[in-house]
Image (spheres, helix red, strand yellow):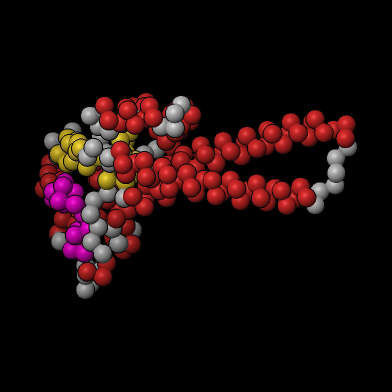
């Protein structure tokens, strides 16, 4: 079920997100699962090749060897299936390869970028959700929640949203022109930039810097590289002037 959520900043600037529906989130999980299974299979294949060329252990040490091998297998599986989501979401702007393919990302409540702590919490709970009925509880929670939140989102204070529509670079004659980057944003994001720039001169400096950082970090992943390297205030000024 597709829903949207509106966020109002302390400076009374309002913008909205389209929440990711259950279907797109499930497909993203399936794509990520395929990648994880392939990674685990590759690791085990490599370990088997190593074991095939290793000397045979002492028969009296078989039990210890089996215990160590079992512990290694458990550690590898947990590291891949848990660490995969934590690392990608925390350091890839709230996206895993599956989420990126489906055009969705994780952000904190209020539209703030996902941090490592929130990623750890939501994905630690994911372990239980995946174990109990393969996300059946997650699906129910997502359908019931007004913000499409599974249990991990409720605990971590996160939401999963759709990326704004991106205009392809070849649609612009001059990709370096600020209008090109501005057109990559959704209508709500363009309005947010315009309203911030109109009000920033009246803001206290600490609030202005914090708001500029939050808005710029939200927009950078979908802008051209020449715009991404600008500092927060210059980036928003350039977008507003387009």
The residue positioned 26% from the left and 28% from the top of the image is: 145
What span is colored magenta in the figure? Answer: 179-194
Residue 136 visible in image: yes
Q: Is residue 78 above or below residue 184?
A: above
User: Relative to 167, does residue 19 appear above or below in the rendering?
Assistant: above
Q: Residue at x 41, y 32 (%)?
A: 135
Q: Please state which of residues 173 and 36 is positioned toward the viewer in this rendering.
A: 36
Residue 147 lies in the magenta-colored region: no
Instruction: Tell me where residue 113 sits by quadrant.
Output: top left
Q: Quadrant of the N terminus?
A: top left
The answer to whether 240 appears left or right of 104 in the picture is left
Q: Can residue 93 be seen in this snapshot?
A: no
Q: Residue furthest bottom?
A: 173
The percent position of residue 6, horizontal first and vertical second, equals 17, 36
**In this figure, what is the number of numbered marks?**
0
Left or right, 76 with reference to 120: right
Compared to residue 152, the image places residue 106 above or below, namely: below
Looking at the magenta stretch, what is its main secondary structure? helix
Front-most of 80 and 90? 80
The residue closer to the viewer here, 225 or 88, is 88
On screen, residue 226 versus residue 6, left or right, reads right
The residue sitting at 34% across, 31% down in the picture is: 139
- The quadrant holding residue 76 is top right
Q: Quadrant of the C terminus?
A: bottom left
Nearest to the observer: residue 239 or residue 167: 167
Query: At which x and y percent is residue 128?
Result: 47, 27
Image quadrant in which you'd find residue 29: top left
Estimate the x, y position of residue 9 in percent, counting from the top left. Answer: 19, 35
């Amino acid at each position: 079920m597709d829903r949207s959520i509106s966020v109002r900043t302390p400076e009374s600037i309002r913008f909205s997100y389209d929440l990711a529906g259950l279907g797109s989130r499930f497909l993203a999980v399936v794509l990520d699962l395929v990648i994880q299974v392939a990674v685990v299979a590759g690791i085990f294949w490599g370990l088997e090749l190593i074991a095939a060329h290793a000397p045979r252990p002492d028969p009296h040490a078989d039990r210890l060897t089996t215990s160590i091998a079992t512990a290694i297998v458990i550690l590898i599986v947990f590291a891949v299936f848990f660490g995969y989501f934590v690392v990608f979401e925390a350091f890839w702007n709230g996206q895993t390869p599956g989420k990126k393919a489906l055009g969705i990302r994780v952000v904190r409540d209020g539209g703030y970028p996902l941090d490592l702590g929130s990623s750890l919490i939501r994905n630690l709970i994911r372990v239980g959700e995946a174990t109990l009925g393969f996300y059946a509880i997650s699906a129910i929670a997502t359908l019931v929640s007004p913000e499409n939140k599974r249990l991990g989102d409720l605990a971590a204070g996160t939401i999963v949203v759709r990326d704004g529509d991106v205009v392809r670079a070849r649609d612009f004659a001059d990709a370096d022109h600020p209008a090109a980057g501005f057109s990559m944003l959704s209508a709500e994001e363009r309005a947010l930039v315009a309203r911030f720039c109109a009000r920033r001169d009246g803001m206290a400096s600490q609030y202005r810097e914090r708001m500029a950082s939050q808005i710029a970090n939200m927009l950078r992943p979908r802008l051209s590289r020449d715009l991404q390297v600008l500092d927060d205030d210059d980036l928003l000024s350039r977008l507003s002037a387009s």
